[in-house]
Every structure is written in structure tokens, then in C-alpha cells.
């Protein structure tokens, strides 16, 4: 375990890290996209079994369809989110403040700064 800890600490110091951004208000996954992904995987398996040009074209067409569907879904979800925020600005504004607080915490997690304590500063 000590070797693993030393390696991860060295990597953190040199490279840094990015915390996973959890955007609870954006939902980009639904059953339609799930079915399209399963179809894409099935076409890929068929292409691997029978490597012909027709199966290749069919296989290559599906990733484009899935990416368009996810882009459309993200755009729609973002529009819904913005509309709820606009409605919230007229009301109690609780949702807006929660989101801004969450964004602020995410930015704070990205910056990994070791603050110097007063005793360390005096010794320096």
C-alpha cells in the first residue's frame, strides 16, 4: 500500500487532478439513447462476424445517430434547466443559489492549494 500511496501522491503533485463534475441538473440518458447504443453494439458484433462493406457502412452509421441523439438530448435538458432557473429568479431563487454554490465548490476542488499556517510562515 505504501508504494501505491507514494505513486499517487507524486502524480498528484506533478500532474494535479480534476474532480469529476457532477451535474445533477443535466440528464443526458434515456431509454431511446440506450436502445440506440445497444443497436450500435449489435451492428458492431455483426460487422466483426461478417466483414463486408455493407455491414461496415451500417456499423459506421450508428455512432453518428447515437451522438446526434445525445447532443439533442443535452440541448433539450440544458434548455429545460435554463427555463427553470429563469422561473426561479422571479421566486425564492433557492435553486439558483444551490447551483452557484455547487459550481463554487467544484472550482475550489480543482484548485489544490496547501495554505501556509501562521507558524510555518513565522518559521520561514
Image (cartoon, helix red, strand yellow):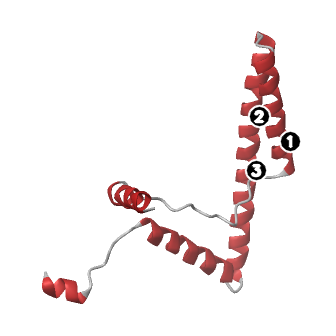
User: Could you tell me which residue is drawn at 70 percent across and 66 percent down?
Assistant: 25
Marks 2 and 3 in Cβ contact (< 8 Å): no
Q: Where is residue 38, by image quadrant? A: top right
Q: Which residue is mark 2?
A: 65
**In the rendered view, would you say 49 is above or below 11?**
above
Image mark for residue 73: 3
Q: Where is residue 16, by image quadrant? A: bottom left
Image mark for residue 35: 1
Give the secondary structure at mark 2. Answer: helix
Instruction: Give coordinates of residue 65: x percent, y percent.
Output: 77, 34
Chain-order first, disc 1 or disc 2? 1
The one of 14 and 102 positioned closer to us in this rendering: 14
Q: State how far apart marks 1 and 2 are (Cα).
A: 11 Å
Q: Where is residue 50, by image quadrant? A: top right
Query: Which of the two marks, 1 or 2, is nearer to us in this view?
Result: 1
User: Could you tell me which residue is drawn at 73 percent across and 24 percent down?
Assistant: 60
Give the secondary structure at mark 3. Answer: helix
Count the numbered circles shown: 3
Marks 1 and 2 in Cβ contact (< 8 Å): no
Determine crowd level at label 2: few under 14, some 14-19, many 20+ residues with C-alpha closer than 10 A: some
**In the rendered view, would you say 89 is above or below 50?**
below
Amino acid at each position: 500500500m505504501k508504494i501505491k500511496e507514494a505513486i499517487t501522491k507524486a502524480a498528484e503533485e506533478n500532474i494535479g487532478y480534476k474532480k469529476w463534475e457532477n451535474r445533477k441538473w443535466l440528464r443526458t440518458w434515456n431509454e431511446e439513447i440506450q436502445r440506440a447504443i445497444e443497436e450500435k453494439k449489435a451492428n458492431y458484433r455483426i460487422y466483426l462476424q461478417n466483414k463486408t462493406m455493407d455491414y461496415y457502412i451500417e456499423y459506421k452509421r450508428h455512432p453518428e445517430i447515437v451522438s446526434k441523439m445525445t447532443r439533442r438530448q443535452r440541448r433539450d435538458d440544458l434548455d429545460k434547466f435554463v427555463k427553470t432557473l429563469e422561473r426561479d429568479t422571479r421566486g425564492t431563487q433557492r435553486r439558483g443559489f444551490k447551483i452557484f454554490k455547487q459550481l463554487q465548490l467544484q472550482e475550489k476542488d480543482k484548485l489544490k492549494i496547501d495554505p501556509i499556517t501562521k507558524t510555518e510562515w513565522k518559521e520561514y
